[in-house]
C-alpha cells in the first residue's frame, strides 16, 4: 500500500487530551443546540460522534474547529483555545467540512497542491491523489466534480498538511463502496501514525469499524460514551440461541438462569434465551444441557450491534 506519510512530522509532546469539552452550551436564538456537553478525545484515538439529525454534532465539531463561538463552557483543542489561539492551532488541525469553504472555479489538484504549500511538512501530494482516486479529475473545476469526488477532495485537503488532529464531518456520506473503503483505510493509517481523529457519522458500521471511542449525542448532550465493544455489551439485552430435541423443559432451564432471563422454544427444537448473555450464562445453559442429556447442534450468541444500541438510546421516531 502506498503510504501518504513518508516521514515523521515534528510533534509537540503535549500530553493533554486532543479535545476536551466541558459544559459546552450553544444557542441559536431560543434554540439550545448544545446543552452542557462534555466530551474528551484521547490523543491518537479515533472518536466517532453519533447522534440523530439535529442532535448538535456539527455545532460541537465546528466550535472545536474554531468556526463558532460557544455561549458557555470550555473547549481545549490540543491544549489551546480554538478561537483565541486560532492562529497557532490552524496549522496543527485538519478540517473536513460537510460542504463549502472552497472556491468553485478552482481545479481539484491545484487546490490540493496550494493547501499543501500552506504547511511546513505536507504529505506526498501525488501519493494522496493516487490513494483517493483523484487523479482522473485533477484538472476538473471544483463545481464540476461529482459529490463523491468533492468529498474525497475535502478529505485530502484535511489531511494533506499532516495534522495532529483531524475533524471529519460525515466523511463517507454519498461515497461509493470503493471510496468508502479507501477513506476507512486512510483513517486507519492516520491513526497508526498517531493522528487523533474526530468523525461524525450516521453509519454505525463505520463507527464500529474505525472508532476506539464512540460518543452518542442527543438533544445537545452526550448520552453515552465508550468503545463500541463497551456500548454493545452494556444496556441492551442479548440473545443466545441453541437447538436440541423438541419439547425441552424450559421451566427447569429458567430455574437455573438469572431471574430476569426469558426462554422460549420458537419452533420445535429451536430455543432462544434472552437476558444478560455473558460467559456465566453460556456456562449455565451448557451445564443444564449436559444434565438433561441435550447435545445442541448449534449454539450461538447474538450480540447487539451499535445500531441496536443507538436506536435503543435515541428512539426510533424521526427528528424534525
Ligand atoms: P445532522 O446529523 O443533521 O447533521 P447535527 O447533529 O450535526 O445534525 P447541528 O447541525 O449541530 O446538528 O444542529 C443542531 C441544532 O441546531 C439543529 O436543530 C439545527 O437546526 C440548529 N442549528 C444549527 N445551525 C444553526 C444556525 N446557524 N442557526 C439556527 N439554528 C441552527
Image (spheres, grey):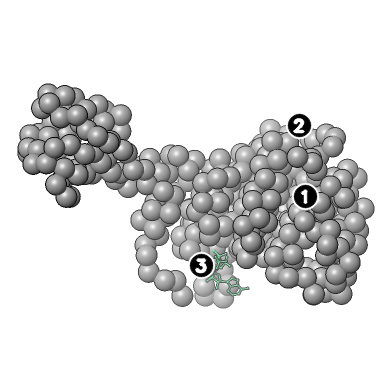
Q: Is residue 229 depicted above or below 91 in this figure?
A: above
Query: Label 1: which residue?
Result: 131
The disc label shown at residue 13, or none: 2
Q: Quadrant of ligand 1?
A: bottom right
Name the residue located 54 percent from the left edge and 63 percent from the top edge: 56
Say which label, 2 or 1, has the lower sequence index. 2
Q: Nearer the viewer, mark 3 or mark 2?
A: 3
- The percent position of residue 167, horizontal first and vertical second, equals 68, 53
Circle 3 Cα neighbour tier, 10 Å, few/some/many (<14 / 14–19 / ≥20): some
Q: Nearer the viewer, mark 2 or mark 1?
A: 1
User: Is the CB of the residue bearing disc 3 within 8 angstroms of ligand 1?
Assistant: yes
Say which label, 3 or 2, has the lower sequence index. 2
User: Is the CB of the residue bearing disc 1 within 8 angstroms of ligand 1?
Assistant: no
**Secondary element at image label 1:** helix
Relative placement, left or right, of 313 versus 197 is left
**Secondary element at image label 3:** loop
Relative placement, left or right, of 251 versus 191 is left
- The percent position of residue 149, horizontal first and vertical second, equals 74, 64
Distance of label 1 from label 3 (alpha carbons) = 31 Å
Amino acid at each position: 500500500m502506498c503510504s501518504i506519510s513518508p516521514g515523521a512530522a515534528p510533534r509537540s509532546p503535549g500530553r493533554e487530551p486532543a479535545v476536551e469539552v466541558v459544559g459546552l452550551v450553544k444557542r441559536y436564538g431560543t434554540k439550545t443546540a448544545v446543552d452542557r456537553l462534555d466530551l474528551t478525545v484521547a490523543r491518537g484515538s479515533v472518536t466517532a460522534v453519533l447522534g440523530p439529525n439535529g442532535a448538535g454534532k456539527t455545532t460541537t465539531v465546528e466550535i472545536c474547529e474554531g468556526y463558532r463561538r460557544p455561549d458557555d463552557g470550555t473547549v481545549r483543542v490540543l491544549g489551546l483555545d480554538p478561537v483565541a489561539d486560532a492562529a497557532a492551532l490552524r496549522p496543527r488541525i485538519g478540517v473536513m467540512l460537510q460542504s463549502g469553504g472552497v472556491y468553485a472555479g478552482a481545479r481539484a489538484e491545484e487546490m490540493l497542491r496550494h493547501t499543501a504549500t500552506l504547511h511546513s511538512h505536507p504529505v506526498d501530494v501525488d501519493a494522496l491523489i493516487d490513494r483517493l482516486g483523484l487523479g482522473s479529475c485533477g484538472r476538473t473545476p471544483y463545481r464540476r466534480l461529482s459529490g463523491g469526488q468533492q468529498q474525497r477532495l475535502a478529505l485530502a485537503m484535511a489531511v494533506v498538511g499532516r495534522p495532529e488532529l483531524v475533524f471529519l464531518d460525515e466523511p463517507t456520506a454519498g461515497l461509493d463502496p470503493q471510496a468508502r473503503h479507501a477513506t476507512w483505510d486512510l483513517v486507519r493509517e492516520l491513526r497508526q501514525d498517531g493522528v487523533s481523529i474526530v468523525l461524525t457519522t450516521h453509519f454505525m458500521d463505520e463507527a464500529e469499524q474505525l472508532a476506539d471511542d464512540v460518543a452518542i449525542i442527543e438533544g445537545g448532550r452526550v448520552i453515552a460514551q465508550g468503545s463500541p465493544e463497551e456500548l454493545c455489551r452494556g444496556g441492551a439485552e442479548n440473545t443466545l440461541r441453541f437447538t436440541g430435541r423438541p419439547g425441552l423443559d424450559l421451566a427447569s432451564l429458567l430455574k437455573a438462569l438469572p431471574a430476569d432471563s426469558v426462554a422460549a422454544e420458537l419452533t420445535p427444537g429451536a430455543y432462544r434465551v434472552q437476558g444478560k448473555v455473558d460467559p456465566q450464562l453460556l456456562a449455565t445453559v451448557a451445564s443444564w444441557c449436559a444434565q438433561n442429556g441435550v447435545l445442541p447442534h448449534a449454539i450461538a450468541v447474538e450480540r447487539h450491534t451499535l445500531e441496536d444500541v443507538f436506536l435503543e438510546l435515541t428512539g426510533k421516531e424521526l427528528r424534525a
